Amino acid sequence: MALAERQQKQVQGAQSPAGRGSSRIFFLVIVFMFWFSSYIYVPVLSPYVEHLGASYVMVGAVLGVYGLMQILFRLPIGIGSDYLNRRRPFIYLGLIASGASCLIFMAGADPVWALVARAVSGIAASAWVVYSVMFAGYFPKEEAKKAMGMLQFTTVIAQLSSMMISGYMVEHWGWNMPFIVGSIVAVLAMLLVLRLPEQRQEKREGGIRLKDLAGVMKEPLLVKVSLLSVLAHCVLFITMFGYTPNQALDIGASKESLGWLTLAFMVPHAAATLYGSRLFGRLLGDRGTLLLGFAGSAVFTLLIPSMPTLAALCATQVGNGFMQGLIFPLLLGKSVSDVARLNGRLQWAFIRLSMR
């Protein structure tokens, strides 16, 4: 009884204005650590797998299984959290999977271990849907966009800061150091979650039903937008999160300098995400902006193999990062606007599943 009363007081405290403010900051720290542990090895991942003796086909499999696991697990995790009306167990799931993937990478000098580890990291990323829902619960409904903006900003900062130092770690302390740091950060984040009160939503009518989701998936505009999003993510994970670091090492760049490659991509990517799509949207319209984004990304991607120096390669990443930053906000905006007529529960379900 005493435990139940204490938990009830924690929930009530978290729901008060002061409690919500402190919970937001506390939760953003956990989000930062989650993405930090998940992305700290990404710039050196493909060179590392190649270092293990893998063929480019195997490198591609390691990179691709990350997305495959999200396809398989993201929807079940989101529905499971809603059905159980629980958030914390799935927050733990994401952190445990993120830390475990780092440990598995160190388990053996074999590409198969890398494949398994990256699959587990895909499960970690699938839990992100619950993070976004829980953070939105700290805000009134009318401030949902503000909540997602804060969450996205924290995500970008965590990814950028972690990827900037991974090459330095490998250069000075060996291939395993990013995995060691990633696992430690994940464990520390799990300790912080112990102080995070459970967030339970009031039972509402009209919950998510599979037949409703099936109807959403048949929407013509959503099908087109989803296909474009798949193509855009293919470019992203083939280039910056795929083979571009290998190309940098092949032309003589050091592992430490891979951080500059990351910075060259992420800064214009973030700027275009925040401001570029709106500016070009007013000038060219949505279709024109998407055409510019895909065409520009194609040109900069084609230039990658012919770049003779790291500086030239970074220039292609500046262009590629900006062009891809034009694409993603527009696609998400179109997908959300097309489900605006659906009930609020389904809108949130779709938005959650659309977030990367």
Image: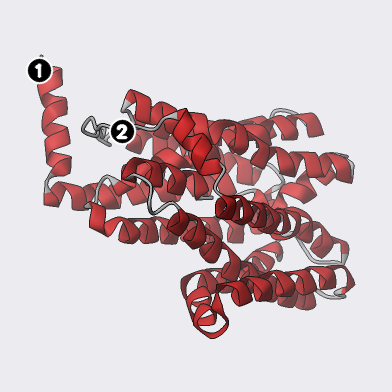
**17 over 69 or under it: above or below:** below
Residue 196's spot in the image, x, y percent? 27, 36
Circle 1 residues within 10 Å: few <14, some 14–19, many ≥20: few
**Residue situated in front as seen by the camera: 212 or 276:** 212
- Say whether residue 345 is left or right of residue 71: left
SS type, badge 1: helix
Question: Which three-letter amino acid code belongs to the residue tagged 2?
Answer: Gly
Q: Is residue 110 visible?
A: no
Q: Does the CB distance between marks 1 and 2 fall below 8 Å?
A: no
Q: Is residue 252 visible?
A: yes
Question: Which three-letter amino acid code belongs to the residue tagged 1?
Answer: Ala
Q: Which residue is mark 2?
A: 206
Q: Which residue is mark 1?
A: 2
- Residue at (63, 70) in percent of width and height: 290
**285 over 321 or under it: above or below:** below
**29 over 134 or under it: above or below:** below
- Residue at (47, 56) in percent of width and height: 338
Q: Earlier in the sequence, mark 1 or mark 2?
A: 1
- Say whether residue 352 is left or right of residue 27: right
**Residue situated in front as seen by the camera: 91 or 204:** 204
Residue 246's spot in the image, x, y percent? 81, 57
**Residue situated in front as seen by the camera: 51 or 299:** 299
SS type, badge 2: loop
